[in-house]
Amino acid sequence: MQYDVSHRAAPRWLILAAVVAIGLNLRPFLTAVGPLAATIRAGTGLDYEGMAWLTLLPMLLMGVGAFAAPAIRQRLGVRRAVLGALALLGMGSALRALATDSALLVATATLCGLGVAVVQAACPGIIKQEFPRRVAPVMGLYSAALMGGGALGAQLAPLISDLSGSWQQGLAWWALPAAAALGLAWRALPAPAVTTPAARAAHRPAGQLLRRRRTWMLMACFGVMNGGYASLVAWLAPFYQQHGWSVARSGSLVAVMAVAQAAAALMLPTLAASRQDRRAWMAAALAMQAAGFAGLALWPEWSPYAWATIGGAGLGGCFALYLVVALDHLPDPDSAGALSALMQGGGFLLASLAPWITAALHSRTGDFLAGWWYHLGCVAFVAALTMRLDPARYARSMTGATARPA
């Protein structure tokens, strides 16, 4: 589904502002949970593996929803799909004010995860369509907003919880910025136009893309890499609370990690924009992830803020660069957006398992150290596959079923 760019109701800067506002709302519902984990456990009776579902389930739904998003967009159009998904995200956040037990809290996570799934599957295609010559920096800005929203969620949730005397209010207040993003998107996102025969001919349906080994490789890399983010969001604050940190201080550590993610997500795609081969910058991001997880595993008390900053920068930079690389593979915005949606769909299905795996390792060892070693191994796995992303082979890797896939 393409946009009516010849009759755009909003200027380009307003569309950019809407993309940023949307991005800011896609992670706080996840990052706010970790710093409040001890309080939520006391109020709901959830154990660590039960708490993992508050991250696992939304990310699982992000994966499933990303696969369904192309059909939703085809039926509703991109504009209505995004607006409806933002409304669902706001509703899920607002209902957390009433979450007095674990069942309702998990239900709100479900609503938020479904809303985010549709939005983040659509945003790369919007960026490719509206900013075709600025894909890398705009994708970096969107990714930075996404990570920055995560930082705000981690930092402000404990403060609002303390001020209100309610952990539910610490989670629910993000309904307000979600409503603001919905209003801005209503004003800025252009209406869909009738897809031309040429565009339909160029568009690659999901079934064709799933026949490409490159699609599955992108899913695997994106998923395993984002598993590190999911585990840190869920367990970094509880890890340091076990080391004697307060709720507010451990929340600030998650916020520092998210700020580093935002900075790297903004900077690395911009630095990588001069060349289509992004592998050197991706290798640098993966090296930072490795340093962060190694520091948490070996010297957790030495410099926690350094490990959070370095690891966060590596995760944020790699996240943004993988979104750019997925769009690089295909020139048509619809097809590139579909590939990005599939990468995110399969990727988030994989990533959703990471917090539970880390929690299960904690249950068996009594500490999160085994989880950090697990993610260090994941970084090595992603690094090996990333080296295969030679842009000279993009076209060949995405050709029709008769060509040998790369």
Image: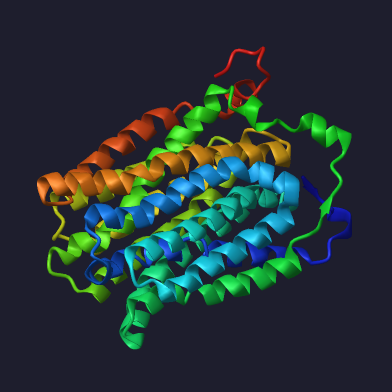
The colour scheme used to paint the residues is rainbow
- Image vertical order of residue 27 relative to residue 64, above or below: below
Q: Nearer the viewer, residue 120 or 131?
A: 120
Q: Residue at x 37, y 67 (%)?
A: 32
Q: Is residue 52 left or right of residue 341?
A: left
Compared with residue 403, is residue 155 higher up or lower down, i.e. above or below?
below
Q: Position of residue 116 (x, y in %)?
A: 54, 56
Furthest residue toward bottom: 163
State the residue in front, 403 or 63. 63
Placement of the C terminus among the 4 image quadrants? top right
Q: Where is residue 163? Give x, y as percent.
A: 34, 87
Can you tell which quarter of the image residue 232 is in? bottom left
Look at 52% across and 41% down and name the residue there: 345
Relative placement, left or right, of 117 versus 229 is right
Q: How many marks?
A: 0
Residue 253 seen in the figure: no
* 157 lies above or below 389: below
In percent of the image, x 58 and y 63: which residue is there? 88
Residue at point 50% right, 60% down?
A: 112
Q: Residue 110 appears at what percent x and percent y?
A: 46, 56
Residue 392 is at least partly visible in this image: yes
Quarter of the figure with residue 261: bottom left
- From the top left corner, tell me how far across and down residue 269 is, in percent: 53, 49
**Looking at the figure, which quarter contains the N terminus?**
top right
